[in-house]
């Protein structure tokens, strides 16, 4: 009797517990959940699991799921929600998970708990994907201040679904100068165990993830790195595109690059802190950035600002030696001679052409790298200074006619004509002075004829199309994620194909016209002049107009004057209206603005 009573009590307790848990489960699944609670887990052929979250767009108030290149063909996927929430996909049955869902592009709905989430699936293609998990599960600390670093894990998967590499991160940190201030930030990724993520056998430790936020094409850095690689400029960084996911959130299209630095498999110079004439790695920089620099820095006698990245903790003697190597060039130019000994002028010629061809905004101001071998390197005597090189190339987002460069600057950077890198600039006259030297001009012309022209033409004719085709799908996802043309701001419809194609063709046209211009000017085939523009009190950024004898004048920008409307330009020497279709006769004159009442 007693055993029966205990059994009935036990059954009643279990029944009550079942009812309580069932009620809790029932009511919990009527609670609203957040879209971040829903996880899409995709398993590759090699058993690697990729976890993804939906992203809520502030631009159109919609949810998106951005799938990497390896995902669309995978049926091995699972959808879950945090806690004990049941999930349903596209109106299917509810369960603790949904397996093998249809992840085709288009409109879908996932329900979890008491919430339903209509969302759009977009698929990338032809690029690898990089997955980073920070130890905190957040980017807050990393993006709070440049240099803040956090450890974590990474996995990189190719477009074919095969794992390229995975491991532990010694650190992920934000980087950049102006680019750090953007919402889509660039990062440096340092791996614990060196690895080659470019498909080769040259492992490196530090990788840079360029956001290309200031380049609507996402192509300019890659175009010029590939061009420099084709021209065999020393230690040009290898690069490849990746779709970046951090803590399961899609972050956009990034260019994964080797870092421009002294390292075993990068710039392998002897940068000792003991040698009086050490090998070194230095960069030209804006003077106002020197105060914030962690590295040693100083100025040449000519006023050029320098950051010495290696070696660290220089003695006064070492600093004087490094500054002196740059002053040797300045002094040689002042005497109209060049030191052929211990300077690699071929690397200087190649670097100059990269800056001039791209019309790089920072051509002599920032991210301009130089490195030098240690004293007595390559069989030299102990008293012979090391050889000085220009490079590696770096940072080309503000180039190739980038429309985001401000129009109020004194130079029209969207105009493919005009000498810029070799123009006279305050405390940045190296290329200008070098190009005034017959010896260096000969080096530049030889490099242009024998190497650069062919490589640039190849990029214009086929290389740009190859890059565009490869990146198109990845770029379309990035456009949704970051709205680079700010359709939301101006309440314009989003049309990726038209915007992207227009941007790519802007680059192609700029490169073709730029190469034509440089061929004419650097070979000395035609006379080149910068004609002054007089806006007559109006507002006008560029104050000169590039002109080639025998060719029609370029179209200047219209000046602006309050209460007036620009009408036309007249010649200062004759007072006659300027006919932009007439070939320039080689006679210098000023273009004077004429206005009419609004």
Image (spheres, rainbow, N blue to C red):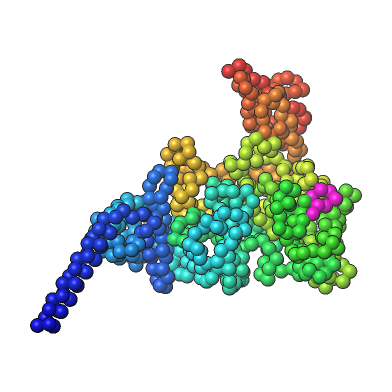
Image location of residue 587, percent across then percent down: 77, 30
- On whether residue 299 falls in the magenta region, the answer is yes
Residue range of the region highlighted in magenta in the rendering: 298-304
Give the residue furthest to the top: 597
Q: Give the quadrant of residue 392.
A: bottom right
Is 577 or 317 nearer to us in this picture? 317
Quadrant of the rendering where the N terminus is positioned: bottom left
Judged left or right of residue 497, residue 79 is: left
- Where 110 falls versus 530 (above or below)? below
Judged left or right of residue 11, residue 565 is: right
Q: Give the quadrant of residue 536.
A: top right
Give the residue furthest to the front: 2
Image location of residue 294, percent across then percent down: 71, 58
The residue lying at 69 percent from left, 48 percent from top is: 362
Is 328 or 340 nearer to us in this picture? 328
The residue lying at 62 percent from left, 53 percent from top is: 176
Is 213 or 32 nearer to us in this picture? 32
């Amino acid at each position: 009797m007693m055993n029966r009573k205990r059994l009935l009590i036990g059954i009643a307790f279990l029944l009550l517990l079942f009812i309580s848990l069932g009620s809790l489960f029932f009511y919990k699944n009527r609670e609203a959940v957040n879209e971040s609670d829903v996880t899409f887990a995709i398993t590759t052929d090699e058993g690697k699991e990729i976890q993804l979250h939906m992203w809520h767009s502030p631009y159109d108030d919609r949810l998106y799921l951005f799938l990497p290149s390896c995902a669309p063909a995978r049926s091995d996927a699972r959808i879950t929600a945090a806690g004990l929430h049941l999930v349903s996909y596209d109106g299917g049955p509810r369960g603790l998970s949904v397996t093998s869902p249809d992840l085709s592009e288009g409109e879908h709905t996932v329900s979890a708990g008491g919430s339903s989430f209509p969302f759009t699936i977009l698929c990338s293609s032809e690029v690898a994907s990089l997955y980073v998990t920070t130890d905190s599960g957040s980017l807050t600390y990393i993006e709070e201040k440049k240099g803040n670093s956090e450890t974590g894990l990474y996995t990189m998967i190719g477009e074919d679904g095969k794992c390229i590499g995975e491991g532990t991160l010694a650190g992920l940190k934000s980087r950049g100068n102006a680019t750090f201030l953007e919402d889509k930030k660039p990062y440096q990724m340092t791996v614990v165990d060196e690895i080659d993520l470019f498909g080769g056998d040259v492992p490196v430790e530090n990788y840079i993830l360029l956001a290309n936020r200031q380049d609507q094409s996402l192509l300019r850095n890659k175009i010029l790195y590939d061009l420099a690689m084709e021209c065999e400029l020393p230690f040009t960084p290898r690069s490849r595109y990746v779709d970046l996911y951090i803590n399961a959130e899609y972050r956009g299209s990034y260019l994964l690059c080797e870092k421009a630095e002294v390292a075993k498999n990068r710039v392998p110079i002897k940068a000792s802190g003991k040698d009086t004439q050490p090998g070194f790695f230095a960069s030209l920089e804006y003077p106002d950035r020197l105060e914030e620099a962690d590295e040693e820095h100083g100025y040449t006698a000519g006023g050029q600002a320098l950051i010495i990245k290696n070696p660290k903790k220089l003695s006064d003697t070492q600093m004087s030696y490094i500054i002196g190597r740059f002053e040797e060039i300045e002094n040689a130019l002042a005497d109209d001679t060049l030191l052929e000994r211990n300077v690699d002028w071929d690397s200087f010629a190649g670097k100059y052409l990269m800056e001039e061809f791209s019309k790089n905004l920072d051509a002599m101001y920032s991210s301009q790298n130089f490195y030098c071998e240690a004293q007595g390197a390559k069989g030299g005597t102990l008293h012979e200074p090391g050889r000085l090189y220009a490079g590696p190339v770096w940072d080309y987002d503000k180039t190739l006619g980038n429309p985001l460069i401000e129009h109020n600057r004194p130079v029209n950077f969207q105009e493919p004509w005009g000498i810029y890198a070799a123009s006279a600039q305050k405390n940045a006259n190296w290329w200008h002075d070098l190009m005034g030297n017959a010896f260096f001009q000969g080096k530049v012309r030889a490099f242009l004829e024998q190497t650069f022209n062919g490589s640039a033409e190849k990029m214009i004719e086929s290389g740009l199309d190859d890059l565009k085709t490869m990146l198109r799908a990845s770029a379309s996802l990035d456009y949704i994620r970051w709205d680079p043309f700010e359709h939301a701001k101006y309440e314009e419809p989003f049309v990726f194909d038209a915007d992207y194609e227009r941007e790519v063709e802007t680059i192609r046209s700029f490169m073709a016209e730029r190469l034509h211009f440089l061929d004419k000017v650097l070979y000395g085939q035609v006379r080149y002049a910068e004609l002054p523009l007089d806006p007559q009190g109006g507002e006008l950024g560029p104050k000169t107009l590039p002109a080639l004898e025998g060719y029609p004048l370029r179209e200047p920008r219209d000046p602006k004057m309050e209460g007036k409307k620009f009408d036309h330009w007249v010649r200062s020497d004759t007072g006659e209206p300027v006919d932009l279709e007439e070939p320039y006769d080689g006679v210098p004159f000023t273009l004077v603005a004429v206005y009419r009442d609004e």
